[in-house]
Amino acid sequence: MVVKNIAMAVSIFSLSTLGACAFKNMKGSITPETLAISYSPDQIGYKEVNDSVFTPNCIACHNQSLHQGSIVLDSYAAVKANLGLVQNQIVGQTMPPNGALAQDQINLVTNWIQAGAPELASDPVSTTPTPSTTSTPHPGTPPTPTPTSSPTPTTLTATYTSIRANIFASKCLSCHSAGSSESRYPLDVYANMMATSSMIVPGNPSSSTVYNQVSTGSMPPRGGNSLTSAEVTIIKTWIQNGAPE
C-alpha cells in the first residue's frame, strides 16, 4: 500500500511539472498579433495598444530622441496629441514604412480610437450624448421627420497654413520634416520650404517640384494616401497666387 501511494504521488508531481512547463512555453510564444486578438473592446487602453503595436513597430523611430516626422509615440500624452495622424498613417497603411501592420493590429488601434482612446482599459468609453428633442405627439398627428445633419466640411484655402494643416500634416510630414527621412525636402516650416530650390516657385506651378509630384501621383508614395483632385487643385491655386503663408 505504501509503495502504491508513493507511485501515485510521483505521477501527480510529474504531471504538474509538465503542465507548468507547457504553460510557460505557451506564454512565451505569444506574439503582438495574437496579443491583439485577445483583447475585447472594453479591455483596450494605451498600454495594450503600446504593447501590441507601438513598441514592436513604431517606437524605434518615434521616440523622444528621434521623433521622426515630429511624432512621438512613447507616451500616452504624445499619442493623444497626434491621434489623427496616427490613425491616418496606420489605418491608411502608410506606416510603418517597411510594410503595413497585421490586420489584427490595425483593428486594435481602430477600436481603441473609436472608444475615445482611453489611457486605461478601465476608463469609461467616451461618447457624446445626443439631447432628446422628442415630444409626445397629439393622437392622430403624423410624426415629424427628424432632420439629418450633414458633417461640417473642412475649410481648405489657398494658403500654406491651411494646406499644411489639412494636407501636409496627414499625408507628407511623416517623411518631409526635420529629422525624418526626406528632411532635405521640408514641408513642415514655411521658410525652410520656400528656401529649398525649386520646391515652390511662386506663380509657376509647373516649375514647382511639390505640385509636379502630387499632380502626377508620384507623391505620397504607396498610393493608399494619395491627394484628392480638390487637394491637388488647391495646391496649384496656392502656387499660382504666389504661395502666400
Image (cartoon, rainbow, N blue to C red):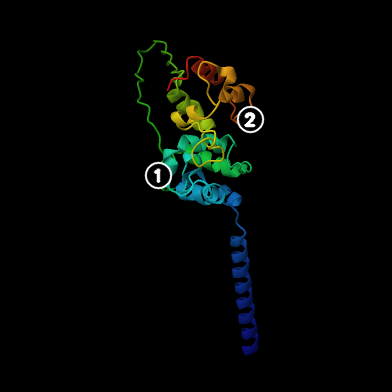
Residue 118 visible at all: no
Residue extending furthest toward the bottom: 2
Image x and y of residue 27, in percent = 59, 61
Who's the residue at 61% across and 73% down the image?
17
Work out whether mark 2 precedes mark 1 in sequence or the reverse, and give the earlier one.
1
Looking at the image, how many numbered discs can be counted on the residues? 2
| Disc assigned to residue 223 | 2
| Disc assigned to residue 77 | 1
- In the foreground, 198 or 78: 198
Who's the residue at 50% across and 27% down the image?
167
How far apart marks 2 and 1 lie (CA) works out to 30 Å
The label nearer to you, 2 versus 1, is: 2
Image x and y of residue 33, in percent = 60, 49
Say which element carries label 1.
Answer: helix
Three-letter code, disc 2: Gly
| Residue 88 placement, left or right of 103 | left
Asked if residue 21 is positioned above or below residue 225 in the image, the reply reads below
| Disc assigned to residue 234 | none
Who's the residue at 37% across and 13% down the image?
139
Q: Are marks 2 and 1 in contact (CB under 8 Å)?
A: no
Quadrant for the N terminus in the image:
bottom right
Quadrant for the C terminus in the image:
top left
Image x and y of residue 66, in percent = 49, 47
- In the foreground, 225 or 30: 225
- In the foreground, 80 or 112: 80
Residue 181 visible at all: yes
Image x and y of residue 219, in percent = 61, 29
Three-letter code, disc 1: Ala
Asked if residue 146 is positioned above or below residue 103 in the image, the reply reads above
The 10 Å Cα crowd at callout 1, few under 14, some 14 to 19, many 20 or more, is few
The 10 Å Cα crowd at callout 2, few under 14, some 14 to 19, many 20 or more, is few
